[in-house]
Amino acid sequence: MLYKNLGLKKDNFSKYVICKKCFTLYNYEDCIILIEGETSSKKCSKVMFQNHRQIARRNQCGEPLLKSVKLKSGDIKLYPYKTCCYKSVKESLSTMAKQKNFEDKCEEWRQRRQEPGVMTDVYDGKFWKEFGEDKKQHFLKTERNYSLMLNLDWFQPFEHVRYSVGVICAVVLILPREERFKLKNVFLVGIIPDMSGEPSVQTFINPFVEEMKITWSTGFSTQSHNNPKKDATFKLACLCVGCDIPATRKLCGF
């Protein structure tokens, strides 16, 4: 309540309604239907097996997306059964770009020396040197083209509870190793609520995937510490996933 009244730490997440059966994400506005002047919840329209040989297997999921709650005033309001929170990568990086020396530190790797046959960081790998659409003009050679490493893990948010919350976060891989994992340089991507077990996460990363398509192709413009009066264009690519084996399989769809 204090944060809310003072206008601090505003909730900048995009919130999606989760189908509790197949985990498909929906915008809240798309989950409401008007029937005879009253608002009701739509049902999940996801078809899991569109080309299944058995016609019965091609049916829609059909799970209700919102629940009706009666307020003290007597009014009925629709609430999601489960909500997934997503934080825009563009917004997070725009905040980081305003930090002093952030852009300069992202360029330090170009001046580092590598001893032949010795690999001390991700910069020394063949994939880093050749990553991109064209090996002659690969992605990371251009200034303000950054790489990300994605992480996913589940944890118990409080002691003595029997449920886990999934957190997707990312770091800017192009930063020096001593800066890469500092709290100020780690940003939150998404929060997966308790779903009675660890679900498949492919639907939960759809907002991230769609945003990364844009940051890869056209990038986004924002002011930074080095360019306070004029927008600079940044491009991003997800270069690596760093998790334990079960989380990696879920995140990458293996």
Image: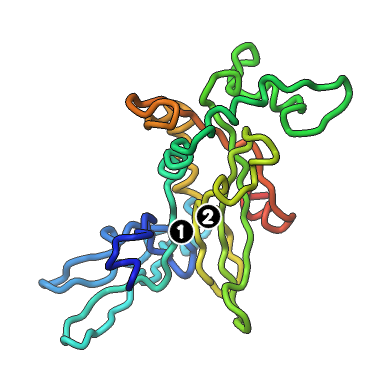
Specify few, some or many for label 1: CA neighbours under 10 Å numbering under 14, 14-19, or 20 or more.
some
- Regarding mark 1 in the picture, which secondary structure is present there? helix
Residue 224 or residue 57, whichever sits in front? 224
Q: Provide residue 12's location: percent of width, then percent of height.
A: 36, 55
Outermost top residue? 136
Q: Earlier in the sequence, mark 2 or mark 1?
A: 2
Quadrant where the image shows the N terminus = bottom left
Residue in view at x 23 percent, y 76 percent: 77
Residue found 65% across the figure and 24% down from its top: 131
Residue at label 1? 58
Q: Which residue is mark 2?
A: 52
x and y, in percent, of residue 144 in the image: 51, 25
- Dot 2 lies on which element? loop
**Residue 215 x %, y %:** 46, 33
> How far from the left and from the top, in percent, is residue 186?
57, 48
Q: In this rendering, is residue 131 above or below 252?
A: above
Vertical arrangement, residue 14 with respect to residue 117, above or below: below
CB-based contact (under 8 Å), mark 2 and mark 1: yes
State whether residue 152 is above or below residue 106: below
Residue depicted at x 76% and y 24%: 126
